[in-house]
Image: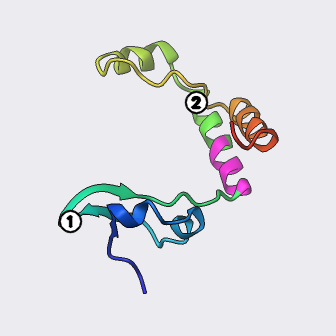
Amino acid sequence: MAMSHISIRDLQKISGEAIGALPGPTPVKSGERTVGLLIPLKATDPDRLAAVLARAERLAKGRDVAADNAALAEFGDVDPVDWSVSAVKALTAKSKSNPKA
């Protein structure tokens, strides 16, 4: 039976395994008021992720970085993280070698 919501009290007691098993985004309620949304993160298919990253790399080669930065400037600070394939591989390698990182 699917949960229609989780109470703020139940949220304190629910396990990570139970969160991962949720079918999708689940409202967190305090009384009748929705105060949050619990979204279970699913494991990524490494082959699919590799294909998406490779496509992004191909598309990025045709971009004008200066023009992109100028267009984004009106939004204020923008995430400066390097999401290249090599950067993501380095990040995931760190995560595997140090699960607490």
Counting residues from the N terminus, which is met first, the one under dot 2 or under dot 1?
1
Q: In which quarter of the image is residue 47?
A: bottom right
Residue 20 tag number: none
Amino acid type at circle 2 is: Ala
Answer with left or right where residue 69 lies relative to residue 52: left
Alpha carbon of mark 2 to alpha carbon of mark 1: how far? 47 Å
Q: Name the residue under label 2.
A: 60
Q: Where is residue 44 in the image (x, y as percent from the top left)?
A: 65, 56
Q: Which colour scheme is used?
A: rainbow
Q: Is the magenta stretch mostly helix, strand or loop?
A: helix
Taking the spot 17% from the left edge, 66% from the top edge, the residue there is 32
Quarter of the image for the C terminus: give it: top right
Q: Quadrant of residue 99?
A: top right
Q: What element carries label 1?
A: loop
Residue situated furthest left in the rendering: 32
Taking the spot 44% from the left edge, 68% from the top edge, the residue there is 24
> Would you say residue 51 sits in the magenta stretch?
yes
| Highlighted range, magenta | 46-53
| Circle 1 residues within 10 Å: few <14, some 14–19, many ≥20 | few
Residue 31 tag number: 1
Residue 87 position (above or below residue 40) = above
Q: Position of residue 77 (x, y in %)?
A: 38, 18
| Residue nearest the observer in this picture, 99 or 87 | 99
Amino acid type at circle 1 is: Gly
Residue 58 position (above or below residue 4) = above
Q: Which of marks 2 and 1 is in front?
A: 1
